[in-house]
Amino acid sequence: MKQMIMATQSRGGCGKSTIIFLLSERYKSATVLDLDDATSATMKQLAYRMPILVSFIDKATKRIDRGAFNSMFESVAAADQDMFLADAGASVAEQLPKYFEMSGPKNVQQLLDQSGIDLKMVCVVGGGNNFKSTMMYLDELVESVNRNFEIIAAYNKHFPMSETQKQIFEDYCNNEGLKSFSFDLVNDKGELALRTAEDVLLRGQGLSGLNPFKAVYFKGCVENIPDLF
């Protein structure tokens, strides 16, 4: 089976590209797909991995084409590679639940099974002002797949949750039977660590060749990502 992890969340700037960066460092042989037509975060941050840009824009209507999901899965099924990481931009992620609802989640699951594709979706959730909208999307996604696909909730600690938000998040995951984990780009929030993180993302070379004393900022965060493949 080809294995595909898709990072998704309809709210922009919540950490989809960050989790793809960390997963790319964890799974160095995975092929990276950038599904974001609007921004180029993954293309820049992971330039050394030569991400493949997958466009979902219909050239005639200039709108997101949900049918492009089928084309993408078809290309994955025909590819020589076995592991894929996909960064769904906000506008594409917004269409994902609608794609499942339109096509029927069971039909999509059967199609992917027949094509030899195991799809897992990592839905990023943030705290603070991000909490309500990111949780609403998570719930919409969960409802749309009707337990036919594995959804993993990923809490981005860059946007801390209040104790009440943490309880709501944990209760929701327990009630829906979702696996969950937390992540952050760097645990150290000192000025030097944050500036190093920004520089690493800007240079697009990942952690390769990075000074060991700077790479240590990221080491724990990469290792703390659970085994998703």
Image (cartoon, rainbow, N blue to C red):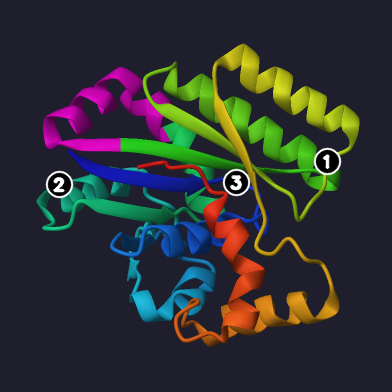
Quadrant position of residue 188: bottom right
Dot 2 corresponds to which residue? 77
As drawn, the residue found furthest toward the front would be: 213
If the image is split into quadrants, where does the C terminus sit? top left
**Residue 100 colored in magenta in the image:** yes
As drawn, the residue found furthest toward the right would be: 163
Q: Secondary structure at mark 1?
A: loop
Residue depicted at 19% across the width and 51% down the height: 82
Q: Is residue 129 above or below residue 42?
A: above
x and y percent of residue 157 in the render?
A: 74, 50
| Tag nearer the camera, 2 or 1 | 1
| Disc 2 from disc 1: Cα separation | 38 Å
Count of numbered badges drawn on the protein = 3
Label 2 sits on what residue type?
A: Ala
Label 3 sits on what residue type?
A: Ser
Q: Note whether residue 185 is visible.
A: yes
Circle 3 crowding by C-alpha within 10 Å: few under 14, some 14–19, many from 20? many
| Disc 3 from disc 1: Cα separation | 19 Å
The numbered disc on residue 10 is: 3
Quadrant position of residue 135: top right
Q: Is residue 142 above or below residue 190?
A: above
Residue depicted at 59% across the width and 32% down the height: 180
If the image is split into quadrants, where does the N terminus sit? top left
Q: Which residues are magenta?
A: 99-118
Marks 2,1: beta carbons within 8 A: no
Quadrant position of residue 18: bottom right
Disc 3 or 1, which lies upstream in sequence?
3
x and y percent of residue 11 in the render?
A: 66, 49
The numbered disc on residue 161 is: 1
Label 1 sits on what residue type?
A: Met
x and y percent of residue 174 in the render?
A: 63, 16
